[in-house]
């Protein structure tokens, strides 16, 4: 039985295009695994695009909230609300969820 791999052409910043086997790009040892990994990576890329879009949307909504809060004489940040968000992410994703929530909060309201 002979395994076949598909070649993928890449362009390097400092040189001409090169062809590398699909298994080489994925770290897989078989063409079948390389194909599965390539498809899964495409799905991850699509998910990342959606996540980035959602984060940008969250940032815009947060800006509206901050503007209205400040215009009404309130503070820019509502710490009790932020604690709720941190708890939600922690409960759903564990300790790394807290880190993710902190990053989102910083993106949306800036550093405090």
Image (spheres, rainbow, N blue to C red):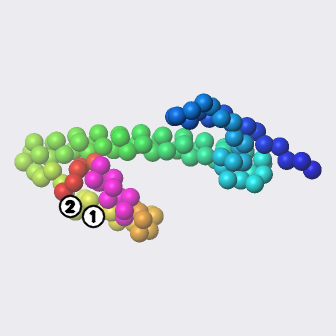
The numbered disc on residue 83 is 1
Vertical placement of residue 68 versus 94, above or below: above
- Res 106 visible: yes
- Answer yes or no: do the residues labelled 1 and 2 have beta carbons within 8 Å? yes
- Tell me the residue that label 2 is attached to: 79
Q: Please tell me how many numbered marks the rendered image carries.
A: 2
Report helix, strand or loop for mark 1: helix
For disc 1, the neighbor class at 10 Å (few under 14, some 14 to 19, many from 20) is: few
Foreground residue among 2 and 40:
2
Residue at coordinates 45% horizontally, 64% vertically from top-left? 93
Query: As drawn, is 94 to the left or to the right of 43?
Result: left
Q: Secondary structure at mark 2?
A: helix
The residue lying at 33 percent from left, 44 percent from top is 58
From the viewer's side, name the closer residue of 42 and 51. Answer: 42
From the top left corner, tell me how far across and down residue 11 is, in percent.
59, 33
Can the viewer see residue 88 in this picture? no
**Is 29 above or below relative to 12?**
below
- Assign the C terminus to one quadrant of the image: bottom left
Whether residue 38 sits left or right of residue 79 in the image: it is right
Could you give the CA–CA distance between mark 1 and mark 2, rounded to whole angstroms?
6 Å
What's the magenta region?
Answer: 98-107
């Amino acid at each position: 039985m002979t395994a076949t791999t598909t070649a993928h052409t890449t362009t390097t910043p400092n040189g001409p295009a090169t062809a590398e086997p699909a298994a080489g790009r994925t770290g897989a040892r078989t063409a079948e695994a390389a194909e599965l990994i390539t498809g899964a990576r495409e799905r991850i890329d699509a998910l990342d695009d959606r996540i980035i879009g959602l984060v940008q949307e969250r940032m815009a909504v947060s800006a509206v909230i901050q503007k209205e809060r400040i215009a009404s004489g309130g503070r820019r940040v509502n710490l009790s609300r932020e604690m709720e968000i941190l708890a939600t992410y922690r409960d759903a994703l564990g300790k790394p969820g807290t880190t993710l929530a902190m990053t989102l909060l910083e993106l949306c309201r800036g550093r405090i």
